[in-house]
Image (cartoon, rainbow, N blue to C red):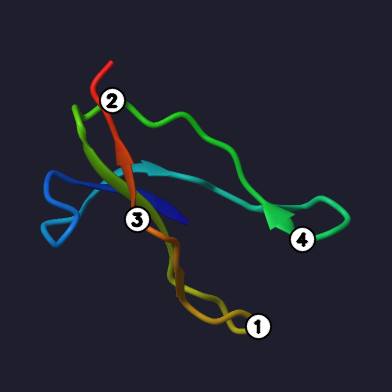
Amino acid sequence: MNIQYSATGKGGWTTVATVPDAMWNGEGYAFSTTAPQAGAGYRRAIYTGAPQFENAVSQVVYVAAP
């Protein structure tokens, strides 16, 4: 799974972190990672699938500059 950044949230997505594995927490799969701050902009998680799972893209969220 990759965490991606876009200044506009409408394109130009850049991978800023890679999550090696999601873990089963008893109710569903979850992941955790720390991504470097790329400035104010939009983030999303994207999963490119596997034989038993479909591709998935999370909702896009805006992250303000610290």
Q: Which mark is residue 37?
A: 2
Which of 42 and 45 lies nearest the eye of the viewer?
42
Q: CA distance from mark 2 to mark 1?
A: 33 Å
| Mark 2 in CB contact with mark 4 (< 8 angstroms) | no
Front disc: 3 or 1? 3
Q: Residue at x 65, y 83 (%)?
A: 52
Tell me which amino acid carries mark 3.
Val
Q: Residue 62, how many percent across, how many down?
A: 30, 42
The residue that mark 3 highlights is 60
The residue that mark 4 highlights is 28
Q: Residue 8, how many percent across, how many down?
A: 12, 50
Q: Quadrant of the C terminus?
A: top left
Q: Which mark is residue 52?
A: 1
Mark 4 or mark 1: which comes first in sequence?
Answer: 4
Q: Residue at x 13, y 62 (%)?
A: 11
Mark 2 or mark 1: which comes first in sequence?
Answer: 2
SS assignment at label 1: loop
Front disc: 2 or 1? 2
Front disc: 3 or 2? 3
Mark 2 or mark 4: which comes first in sequence?
Answer: 4
Mark 3 or mark 1: which comes first in sequence?
Answer: 1
